[in-house]
Amino acid sequence: MAPGYKFFIQTYGCQMNVYDSAVISTLMEQAGFQPVKTEEEADILIYNTCAVREHAENRAMGRILSAKGRYPLRKIVVVGCMAERRKSELKEKYGIKYVFGPREYKNIPGVLINQEAHYINLNYDDILPEQEGVSAYVSVMRGCNRFCTYCIVPYVRKEEVCRQPENIIDEVKKLIKDGIKEVILLGQNVNRYKYRDINFPELLKWVAEETDIKRLNFLTSHPADISSELFEVMVGHNNITKFIHLPVQSGSDKILNKMNRGYTVRDYKNIVKFARGLIPEITITTDVIVGFPGETDEDFQKTLDFIKEIEFDYAFMFKYSPRKGTLSALFDETITEREKKERLSKLIELQNKITYKKNERLIGRERKILVLGTAKRDGVMGKDATGKLVVFKGDSKRGSFVKINITGITGWTPVGKVVKSVNREM
Ligand code: SAH
Ligand code: SF4
Ligand code: F3S
């Protein structure tokens, strides 16, 4: 296959996959392939997959197999975490010739062109992927060494590799030139970033000070590796969003221990207390898993109590899904699917009330909003300086800043009216 052919990428999974799709797209374009927006137009169909839960795999697999049936003559390329986990199955059982794990993306164009894989390892430090719009991701590290017992990520994304800070700064500067206003630094656990003697708070400070980025943000933090220094850097820089995503997973110490998370409920509460003491307006979100093996009614109640006490601004809540190859897949499942469902809906119901209550407190307040684009239903969507999404009426330009008065809540989203446009970040 020669360059000149058209490719389409469908992305599943987390922000890291979104970023990786931009990397793949840039690599393909550099090799002469042309990106298109639909499967129909493409000669090469690339599926960037997730393996974190069974449901995520099923969705991607369904789409891949249906594409294979519909487009028998096109090249199908499966990449991402499921590609790594089920490589031989994809190749042998489903006859997919092109399968690349997260460390192999540099080889995609070469293999498509002349079946040659030149690179043994993907050092992507030198690739500055093209990204459009208002917000962009910048990966600061890949992989994870934490091995939470339920998690497939360390197996598919392999060991931690940190990126050179100079390349990160270069990438942020390039994005700013391309019109990007918000950068989100990415890592499975950014708190373990270390390059030479530079740790994550130092890297964050460096990016905040050395570039003109208007909004700077990062994902994901781990309670066992986070330090007070991080919050101090956040409070000291106006361009750093006062937002932290800090997955807790469970409110029971017994379960946290079985998950190998490396902290207690008390440790977590102390972090939140410190963060809110220093930055009272900080937005804190989390991830929770229900139905982990051995989670009794009492353990689950502890999670509910914990969620009630902390009052997260938002939570991503999941039913435990055993992943073959992880340690917890060897534990006996003690919770039926029905119980998991029940626990999940109870938890969601509780968190929804809290999310509503917390957003309701914003009514009557003024927020400085970065305009992201049109809202799903009606109006314009933007993000405030604490990472909260707000919807408002008007025709404000994407990437501009406006001052909004929050007037109400629709669903769980704060809605508002423009007070005035502002040309610079305040
Ligand atoms: N690196 C991040 C996110 C990893 S995956 C972190 O450490 O926080 C995102 C979320 O998916 C996790 O926080 C967890 O809540 C959930 N998750 C991971 N593995 C899971 C599994 N086997 N079953 C259910 N949820 C899972
Ligand atoms: Fe998975 Fe834990 Fe690593 Fe997050 S820190 S990616 S949950 S192993
Ligand atoms: Fe992300 Fe899914 Fe992989 S959450 S790291 S794409 S398993």
Image (cartoon, rainbow, N blue to C red):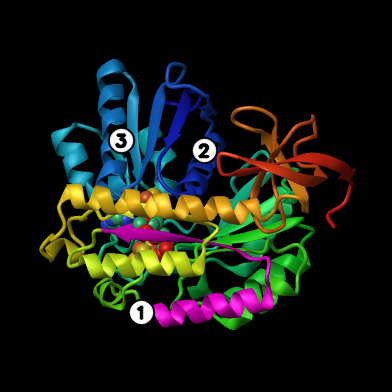
* Residue hosting label 3: 59
The percent position of residue 172, horizontal first and vertical second, equals 68, 56
* Residue hosting label 1: 262
Q: State the residue in front, 250 or 372.
A: 250
Q: State the residue in front, 372 or 65.
A: 372
Judge: label 1 CB < 8 Å from ligand 2.
no
- Please report the bounds of the magenta region as a residue range: 264-290
Gap in Å between the C-alphas at discs 2 and 3?
A: 22 Å
Mark 3: which amino acid?
Arg
Q: Tell me where residue 230 sits by quadrant.
A: bottom right
Callout 1 environment at 10 Å: few (<14), some (14 to 19), or many (20+)? some
Q: Is residue 273 above or below residue 396?
A: below
Note whether residue 175 is visible.
yes
* Residue hosting label 2: 25
User: Which numbered mark, 2 or 3, is in the foreground of this view?
Assistant: 3
Write the residue at 79% across / 30% down. Answer: 394
The percent position of residue 162, horizontal first and vertical second, equals 50, 68
Q: State the residue in front, 261 or 78.
A: 261
- Chain-order first, disc 2 or disc 3: 2
Gap in Å between the C-alphas at discs 2 and 1?
A: 37 Å
Callout 2 touching callout 1 (CB < 8 Å): no
The stretch drawn in magenta includes residue 275: yes
Mark 1: which amino acid?
Gly
Q: Tell me where residue 72 sits by quadrant.
A: top left
The percent position of residue 87, horizontal first and vertical second, equals 23, 45
Callout 2 environment at 10 Å: few (<14), some (14 to 19), or many (20+)? many
User: Which numbered mark, 2 or 1, is in the foreground of this view?
Assistant: 1
Callout 2 touching callout 3 (CB < 8 Å): no
Judge: label 2 CB < 8 Å from ligand 3.
no
Q: Secondary structure at mark 3?
A: helix
- Chain-order first, disc 2 or disc 1: 2
Report the side of 311 relative to 413 (left or right): left
